Image (cartoon, helix red, strand yellow):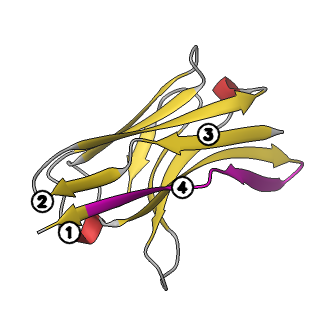
Amino acid sequence: QVQLEESGGGLVQAGESLSLSCAASGRDFGRNAMAWYRQVAGKQRELVGKISSGGDTNYADSAKGRFTISRDNAKNTLYLQMHSLKPEDTAVYYCASFFTVGLNEYAYWGQGTQVTVSS
C-alpha cells in the first residue's frame, strides 16, 4: 500500500513559478515509476509528465520546457517545478505511483493540490 500526499499548490500570477511536492509513504517508492497529472473540472485528467525509477523523464507537450519532474528516493518525494505559468495551467495536480502485477499496471493516487494561475 502506498499513500501519496501532494503539497505546494496555490495562487500565482501568470509568468511566475511554483513547486509541488508529493510525499510518499509505504514500500518500494524508489522502484516505482511516478507521474504528475492534472485535471480541470469537467475535463479528463491529463498527463503532465512521468519519471521512471531511474530518473528518466518525459513530458506532455504543454509542459515541455517549462516544467521539470524530479524525485528524491531517499526522501520518498516526487517534485514538480513549474515555470512561466499560464492561466491554462490552472488545475488540480495529482501525483501517481505506478506498479505492475503480472502484465497489468496499476496506480496509487494522491488527493491533489489546486494550482490557480491568474492572468
Report, in whole angstroms, how far the alpha carbon at label 2 lies from the one at label 1.
6 Å
Which residue lies most toward the right here?
Answer: 102
Real-space CA distance between mark 3 and mark 2, rounded to the nearest whole angstrom? 30 Å
- Crowd rating for badge 1 (residues with CA inside 10 Å; few <14, some 14–19, many 20+): some
Label 4 to label 2: alpha-carbon separation: 21 Å
Q: In percent of the image, x 71 and y 30: which residue is there?
A: 25
Instruction: Say few, some or many: other residues with alpha carbon within 10 Å of mark 2 (under 14 / 14 to 19 / 20 or more).
Output: some
Q: Which residue is nearer to you in this view: 103 or 106? A: 106
In the rendered image, residue 19, in percent from the top left (x then y), is placed at 32, 39
**Residues shaded magenta:** 102-116
Q: Earlier in the sequence, mark 2 or mark 1?
A: 2
The amino acid type found where label 3 is placed reads: Ala
Query: Dot 4: few (<14), some (14–19), or many (≥20) neighbours within 10 Å?
Result: many
Residue pictured at 28% horizontal, 64% vertical: 89
Whether tag 1 and tag 4 are in contact, CB under 8 A, the answer is: no
Of tags 4 and 3, which is closer to the observer?
4
